[in-house]
Amino acid sequence: MKSRTTGGVVILALLGMNVQAAGLPEKIELADSSMVLIAAGEFVMGSDKVDTQKRDTEFGSIKPWYLDEHPRQVKQNKDFYIDQYEVTNGQYKSFVLATRRQPPSHWMEDGYLVSMKRDKLAQLSVVKLRNVVVNTFQLDIDTRKMSKQALLEALDKHFTREDKIPVHNVNWFDAADYCKWAGKHLPTEAQWEEAARGRVGNEFPWGNDWEPGRANTGDEEWQFGAAPGGSYDKDKSSFSVFDMAGNVSEWVSDWYDAYNQSDYQSEKYGRQYKVIRGAGWGGSGHYALEMYQRGAYRLYLSPDADHEDLGFRCAVEPSKSVLKSASIK
């Protein structure tokens, strides 16, 4: 059924109704992740905002605020699925093991790399294992009377916690290759923004009113910086996609460039930098400001850059092969 539009925005969307594409399930489970459907339709992208108070200078922004979001426009995507949560260490570990990819640098620094060689740990003496638990992983437990089995179980619990953390310290090429390996692709800017802002272009994933503490942007301390996906149940878009305002910023597929009919030009535009979207927990200076949590906000980095609060999620079109391999929820 076709619906009439007001200002290019679908009336059903204004009423908060999510129209499901004919015959497509709203959620699917693939081998590596849960994905939610963003059905084909019109949505608002970008903004016409202007920083009249020059707050970008006050906060030392690397670019003017808002201008690269111009103009506010109505766009249309085809049906696609997007990961409900950011790709985790555990998911990325499967990729590293299968492809012999260089692992993220922090896996060596915090010892997570050892989880890929669990059998080697089991071969250590109880004395050496106690030393590993205390000095390498710095687990806050008294190991003096713990058996070898108890020590191994403590390490397994630690690895399981880290499995659930969004992977980071991966550059754009790493992220794109993971998505390709998983039979998907990095979302386009338009796909990411629709998934975050909904049909009507909300300022934030949850709506238009900003409140501190709704997303992981560094106000709370987590053991690994980032939190397990979905820990902030209020950082959820109208499509039930989580952590698009915080946790880790995310690579998307596009080069950083001007939107059609943009009134702003930048020497940074062109095939130099890839776009990242969403705020991070703060490990690389992604401040806990409402500006960075906005769904329209754009940032850019060299595709070979990596940071401790920068990760990604994947998207895919609903082909027959995808749906055949999926578990329907």
Image: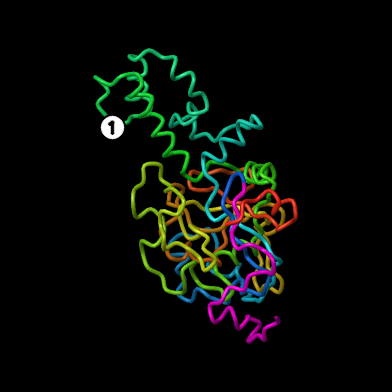
Residue 94 position by quadrant:
top right
Q: Secondary structure at mark 1?
A: loop
Q: Amino acid at mark 1?
A: Asp
Nearest the camera: 264 or 308? 308
User: In the shown orientation, is residue 15 left or right of residue 179?
Assistant: left
Q: Where are the magenta residues, as a range?
A: 1-30
- Residue 103 position in % (x across, y down): 57, 33
> Secondary structure of the magenta portion, mostly?
loop
Quadrant of the snapshot with the C terminus: bottom right
In magenta stretch: residue 27 = yes
Q: Residue at 64% across / 85% down in the picture?
A: 7
Which residue is most to the right? Answer: 320
Nearest the camera: 122 or 205? 122
Q: Residue at 53% across / 75% down in the picture?
A: 50
The residue identified by callout 1 is 140
Residue 193 position by quadrant:
bottom right
- Residue 248 position in % (x across, y down): 49, 51
Quadrant of the snapshot with the N terminus: bottom right
- Please determine whether, in this image, residue 78 is positioned above or below residue 123: below
In magenta stretch: residue 137 = no
User: In the shown orientation, is residue 328 left or right of residue 229?
Assistant: right
Residue 64: tell me if it is visible: no
Residue 43: tell me if it is visible: yes
- Residue 178 position in % (x across, y down): 64, 42
Q: Residue at 41% across / 45% down in the picture?
A: 225
- Please determine whether, in this image, residue 58 is positioned above or below residue 227: below
- Please determine whether, in this image, residue 94 is positioned above or below residue 188: above
Q: Specify few, some or many for label 1: CA neighbours under 10 Å numbering under 14, 14-19, or 20 or more.
A: few
